Every structure is written in C-alpha cells, then in structure tokens.
Amino acid sequence: MPNFETEIKYLPGVGPKRAEILEKDLKIRTLEDLIYCFPFKYIDKTKFYKVSEITADSAHIQAKGIITKFKINNAGKKEFLTAEFSDETGSFELIWFKGVKWIKENIAAGKEYIIFGKPSFYNKKLNIAHPEIEEPSKIDPKTASSMESAYNTTETMKSKFLNSKAIRKLIQTAFNLIDSPISETLPNYLLEKYKLLGLKESLFNIHFPQDVNLLKRARYRLKFEELFYIQLNILKLKVNRKNTIKGFIFAKVADNFNNFYKNNLPFELTNAQKKVIKEIRADFSSGKQSNRLLQGDVGSGKTLVALMSMLIATDNDYQACMMAPTELLAIQHFRTITKMLENSNVKVELLTGSTKAKNRIELHEKLQNGYINILIGTHALIEDTVQFKNLGLVIIDEQHRFGVEQRAKMWKKNTNPPHVIVMTATPIPRTLAMTVYGDLDVSIIDELPPGRKSIQTIHSYDAKRLQMFKFLKDQIALGRQIYIVFPLIKESEKWDYKDLEDGLESISRAFPPPDYAISVVHGKMKSDEKEKAMQLFIKGVTNIMIATTVIEVGVDVPNASVMVIESAERFGLSQLHQLRGRVGRGADQSYCILMTSYKLSKDAQTRINTMVESNDGFKIADVDMKLRGYGDIEGTQQSGEAFELKIANLYKDGEILIHAKNVANDILDDDSFLEKEENSVLLRQLKKNSLRIKNWSVVS
Ligand code: ADP
Ligand code: MG
C-alpha cells in the first residue's frame, strides 16, 4: 500500500542505489519528500526549434530531426560518443560521455527523434551534451504541455540517469501508485475563506500544470502554506510566552534616569529616540517579558537609548548588562557610559576576555551582592560563572555577531528571564525580520541626529592613489582624521595581513612625521596594544588609523571624516555600509572612498554603485538580499538551515508572507492554544513541521 511514508527505494524505477543518491543529493527519502521536490521552472514543450534558429546562447531547446554519423572518439583514456543531429535547416553535434552503450543499443541512425537539451559551444562547434531523446510517436499529446516541469539535479544524479526528466517520471509514478488519499494540511475554513486550492490538486498541478491558472493557484497555495506555518509557529510561541512568562515590572522612573536626563544628557534626543524609549518603557511596565529588536542605522544613537533603558532598570533596583561583539567596542561603550554617568551613583563595570583573574573574582562578587548596577562587556558575560543578584535587562549590541545559543544563555541568568533588547545597525529586510525575528517586537530609529551631512561616497581606482593621498592631506590640514581599512582574509586559522603591511608601508612613506601620525589596529594585536592605538586616535594624537575590519562595528570618533576602504570589491554590502558609518558622526562633511581594481565582477560593480548612490541602510540591505539571497545575509546565515523553504521566496513573496502572518494572527487571537476542533489540523502540522524547522523563537 504505497503512501506518503513509503520509502523511495520501493518506488518502481528507483531501487537502493538511486535511492541512496536521491537521499544524499536531494534529501528525498520518502514518496512525500519526492512529491515535495518542486520544479524550479517550466519549459515550453510545444515549441520546436529549427536547427538554424539555435545558438549557443539559447536556453533549453527542443528540436525534431534525424540522428546520424555515430562515432566513438577518444579523449585521452576516456571514450565518448558523438553523432550528428540534422533537420532541413542544418545540423549540429550531440555528445555523450556516459551511457554510451545504452545510446548505441537504443537509438537508430537515420530515424526521426525529438531531442531536448541545452546547446553549448565547444571546439568552435555548436553541440548538445546528453540530450533527452524521445521518439515522436511515443510523445503523449496529453502531457506535452507548454509548461513541462523541470527539476534541479546534480552531476552525480545525471550520471545515474536521474536527470530532470527521470525525476518527473518518478513523480508521475508516485502519483499513480499512492492509494491512500493525500490528506489536507490546512483547515477547511481557511481553504474556503481564502479560496485556496486543495492540497492534492496543488501538488498535482505544481508538477503537471493542467493550465496556467491552476498552476498559479497551486503555487500560491503551496507558498502560502509554507509561510503560514512558519508564522503560526513563531507567533504561537510568542503568544504562549507572553501568557506564561512573567516579566519584571519596572514601574518607576527615578533619580538615576531623571538626573541623567536633566544634568548629563549632552544633547536633545531625536524624536525617533524619544519614540523608541517610550516603546521600551511600555514594555517595562507591561508585566510581560519583552524581547525587542531595535533597528537603527549606523550613527542613529542607539547607545544612548540603551543607556537610558538601563537606567530605568537600575531605578527599579534591577541590574542591567550590555554585551558588545568586540572588546574594542565594549571598552568604548564602557568609556562613553562612564563619562555620561559622571557624578551619579550608578556603578558601571567592564568585563571582557582580558579582565584579569583577580579582578574577575572581585567583579563576580560585586555582581552577586548587587554593588554593580550596570555591567558592560563582551561574550565573557555569557559564561556561567557570571551571576547577577537581580538581572532585569540585557542589551545586546550589534546583534548579528551573536549566535542564537549565546542569546539563550542570557535568559538563564535570573529565575525569570530578563527583558531583552537586541540592537542592530544592519537593517534586516522586513520580510526577513518577520520570519527570523518574528517573535521580537521591532522598534526603528529612523532619523539621524540633526546637523549630520550625508556622507559623500566616491569610487576610485588604485591608479588614482596619489590623487587620493592628496585629498587625505587636505582633509588632515583641516584638522580631520582618517580611517584606512584593509580587508582581512581568513585562510584556515591564519590571518593574512599582507595587504595591510604593504599598504602601511606606502602610507607611512606618503604621510611621514612630524606632520602625520599613524595608528594601526588589527585583530592579531593584543587587546591592550589595540586599545592604546585606538586611544591615540580617539584623542587626536594620531590622524590616520590603519585597520582591518576590527573597527567595523560601533567605533565612534566624531572628528574622523574620511573612510578609505581598500580593495572595496572584497567586502560585502552590509560590511561596507557599517564601515562607512564610522564617519559622518560629527558636523563636518564626511567622505567614503572605495578603492578598487579596474576589473570588477558584475556583483561587485553593483555593490559599489549601490554604495555610491545610497546612504540608506534599508535600501542597501534590500540590494544585498537580492544579490545574495536571504540565506546569506549577515547574521542570519543560520536562517537558511532553520527554514528550508521549498517554494516560497522571502524576497519575492513578501505580500504572501504578510497575508500569511495576518491569517496566523487572526487564528491565534481567536484560539491561542489551537484547542478548537477546527484547528486540530494546524496543531498536527505544527508538530510535524517542528521536526524540520528549528525553533528560533525561544531564544531570541
Ligand atoms: P549607533 O546607533 O551607530 O550605535 P551611537 O550610539 O554610537 O550610534 O551614536 C552616534 C553618535 O551620535 C555618538 O557620537 C552620539 O554621541 C551621537 N548622538 C546620539 N544621539 C544624539 C542626539 N540626539 N543628538 C546628537 N548627537 C547624538
Ligand atoms: Mg552602536
């Protein structure tokens, strides 16, 4: 009785060997997996090309003609077979490297065949390798469709005759054999309300479209379902969390906050900062544990929001901590915040990997007896030995550097989980944020502090280096400071500093003392050396900072007005945007100079152009997503594993996603725990999917 659970090896035409390949290459283990292996495109099989119309640029083509002149060739040791395919307009070559025996036994010279394949140009001749071949009489007019499904396969698969056509045949066989009904995976009321095509019909039409309209409806339904269950899963966890986990209540705003606000706040808050602080305060008094994602472009003033939130925690006798992705940044936050809290009673301490064992013991004690109010640090904060007396708020800066598991650990630092604010300057496209961070509430700082001039970005070439140096000298003469950043190449465990070293040499020659002083910072330096070099630059003792990407996040030197990025083509978009964000922090006109070689790949050219044209982090994130696909967006790499989307595309299907989210919300509003009979299918599917989809929500 074949059904969805039947193992693929029992399907006629598969057997153990091919089953192994299918499982290894496409993760197909059961008939269900096979049927859920969706085509990546459809090919018009009603159209026949004439040989004279075909070029090496043609996509897959179908042609009718005769095959003649079979010939065995030798390339080194390897034998391959060629033949000539011709119609009344001309001829080209067919080539087989594999399956030669089968071709010789089954294909007759001089007989008419239909061939199908991708033309290419080899040895100055047009040819098609491993074409699909069919006899015209055997083509079933019923399945010859203008939308024949095509499937992704691998080289290994092709060598075992598991090409696109074979997959299609297997799916056909599976459909014919499965004798238990395919049970619907969405509740009936949803199908009716949103006029969704039934599951069985959708699955059939996605593989064998009966007409354009049915294909459209099938795709829609399957995409909707896929996105809907992801949303339902995330939102259900969020609802359950809000219903079951108590949040600390920070009821009052008292001296710590008020004194800071009245006496120490160095500037007027922007409206966006005010709005976000309001949202955070609402979280704090809601009685629910909050998880908030705070997005704000580089330089939008997130640190201040973090500080003010922490002050509210301390006003309510809770401790707060703030975690930064690099030591440099943690130290910088520590300094900024200590300075902003001058003359206040708030006790702030720093904990990083370089904190000495002796100081550490003392620090642990002061955390546990409640002496320390605010702890700032790096990953070191996560260690189990770091225990608080009463941790009420965790702030995670530049979140994309932290793994999900590390975040989860912060939850366990108090009997009830503390409030969590995750800050990021890497704008996440909305659809992605909804999916990966779907259970976080989102606040956006969409405004920069006043007086900032937008950064002017210039693309320049190695050949214009002298001109660039001249420009830097002019800027330095105006009192400005300059960053020059080199890419860091990771080769196995060794860091390659050749670029930086070479660059340093030429820059040192062009910018000699006493007029110029240079600081160097890179990842291989000891942390106190780094910190020393950084301080010289912050204090303005040095006017040039040469660095690798260690300065990428967060470093704040308002007087620095030029960011030169060497080999800019080697950086990703979000990294370029982050680096550029190091300048434009003071009132002066700032510049970002992207140095590249002359020859750029198409993607690199797009990245550079985007940087030159736009300062808008969200726009840049969008382009980034388009170029790389959502799975590669920095910080969300894991999302690729978390959601193996089979048909939906987070970039293109944003509207369906939003619809799916709203539908999921409505259902949960009405039935938070999905206890109603009509929703039993939802619960069943969630359980089934959760085996596939890793659970993100509990940890963010
Ligand atoms: P980011 O959001 O990138 O972390 P920061 O918090 O480092 O930004 O702030 C960038 C700079 O802007 C800092 O020098 C900070 O002191 C300054 N800043 C923050 N808020 C304001 C404001 N409301 N008005 C003027 N400057 C501000
Ligand atoms: Mg910051």
Image (spheres, helix red, strand yellow):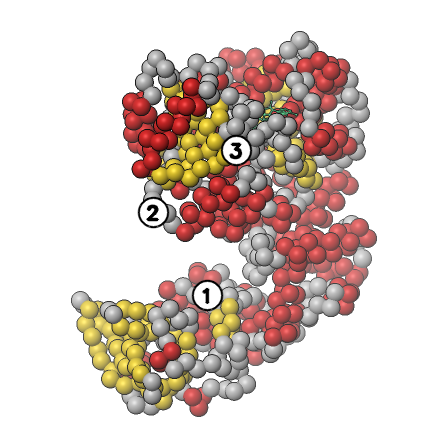
Where 172 falls versus 676 (above or below)? below
Question: Picture quarter containing residue 206?
Answer: bottom right
Q: Is mark 2 within 8 Å of ligand 1?
A: no
Where 646 falls versus 452 (above or below)? below
**Dot 1 amino acid type:** Asn
* Residue position for label 1: 152
Q: Residues within 10 Å of mark 2 (few under 14, many from 20)?
A: few
Q: Earlier in the sequence, mark 3 or mark 2?
A: 3
**Dot 3 amino acid type:** Ile
Mark 3 lies on a secondary structure that is: loop
In the image, which disc is placed on residue 455? 3
* Residue position for label 2: 599
Residue at the (24%, 69%) spot, across then down: 123
Choose mark 2 or mark 1, whichever is in front: 2
Mark 1 lies on a secondary structure that is: loop
Find the distance from the CA under tag 1 to the CA under tag 3. 44 Å
Q: Earlier in the sequence, mark 1 or mark 3?
A: 1
